[in-house]
Image (cartoon, rainbow, N blue to C red):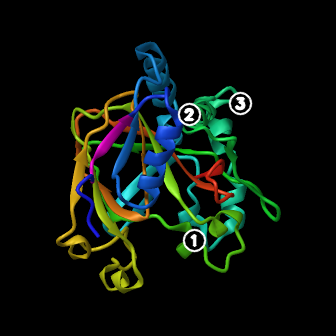
Amino acid sequence: MFSPAWSCLSLSAENPEANRKALQDLIESRTAILKLEGFFSPNRLKSLHERIGAKKSLAQVTGYVNGSLTTFGPYLAKHLADLSRYFEQAGEIYRIFGEDFELDREVRSKIGHHFGLEKIEPAFDIQHGPYAPCTIRIHGNRVANPLHNDNIKRDGANSGLTVAGLTHQLSCVVCIQECTSGGELKHYQKQWEPADERYKIPAGLGYEPQVVDGYPSITFRPREGDVYLINPMNYHEILPTYGKDRITMGFFFGFTDPELRQAIAWS
């Protein structure tokens, strides 16, 4: 059922209980995006630009038939066939940027405050160890991110992974640097279902556009310093970027209790 409120909702930290209602709407696909503003000063963002730019040559580029991903830090979906490789690389962000890299911890703390959580901490797997806490993503000039969805419960089925047993999965993204133009998030009020696999692009990223035909969407351009949450089980894409790099930090998180008070995060 389509929601007339498929839009972006800005939240303040002043009313965690009202924010929790908005969080439930996000989980149930009634709201498209929750935006948390004013987390970072211009000086803090400038420092992050410079720190990431100085390490750009160390970013990993993963190619697909219909695009590529340039990232610092591993993302679990890439390594589901080789989990040992993912867990070996789980601390890569800190190896590259130093143990004093605090961005992911800052954001988790602020999310916990906004939504009245008892805790939100990096996921840990009894068999494998700690998960990667975040990735930093660079979209260069003319780079897009094809239409896709993220669903670890589906993709990690039968893996035994801690995060594959979570009921809900949300995505948190921090806009560190805006591109000159383009780079918008296009987010659809359509969640994956098994019949959609006929639209999957073989050996590529994501799905053919017909999978979202007729569904409402929102086009959202994040500003530097914005922190925003989406339900990544809905289809979404990043439109082509132009000019300056689009730089973001992101992670997934989900809840370990039915009251949505305790969360774990991974990338």
Q: Residue at x 44, y 25 (%)?
A: 49
In depth, the one of 154 and 66 nearer the eye is 154
What is the span of residues highlighted in magenta in the rendered image? 6-10
Front: mark 3 or 1:
1
Q: What element carries label 3?
A: loop
Secondary structure type for disc 1: helix
* Residue 8 lies within the magenta run: yes
Q: Name the residue under label 2.
A: 107
Name the kind of residue labelled 3 in the image.
Answer: Glu
Tag 2 or tag 1, which sits nearer the N-term? Answer: 2
Reply above or below: 35 against 132: above
Residue 174 is situated, as x and y percent measured from the top left of the image, at 45, 37
Q: Main secondary structure of the magenta part?
A: strand
Residue appearing at x 23%, y 56% in the figure: 4
Percent coordinates x, y for residue 244 in the rendering: 28, 32
Residue 203, numbered label: none
Please tell me how crowded label 1 is: few (under 14), some (14-19), or many (20+) other residues with Cα within 10 Å: some
Q: Nearer the viewer, residue 72 or 147?
A: 147
Determine which residue is flagged by label 3: 99
Q: Where is residue 143 in the image (x, y as percent from the top left)?
A: 28, 50
Residue at image location 43% in from the left, 18% down from the top: 46
Q: What element carries label 2?
A: helix
Q: Is residue 141 visible?
A: yes
Does residue 87 appear to the left or right of 202 in the view shown? right
Q: Nearer the viewer, mark 2 or mark 3?
A: 2
User: Which badge, 2 or 3, is on the more N-terminal residue?
Assistant: 3
Q: Dividing the picture into quarters, in which one does residue 210 lie?
A: bottom left
Image x and y of residue 25, in percent: 42, 54
**Are dots 3 and 1 in contact, CB under 8 Å?**
no
Amino acid at dot 1: Lys
Name the amino acid, label 2: Val
Which mark is drawn over residue 153? 1
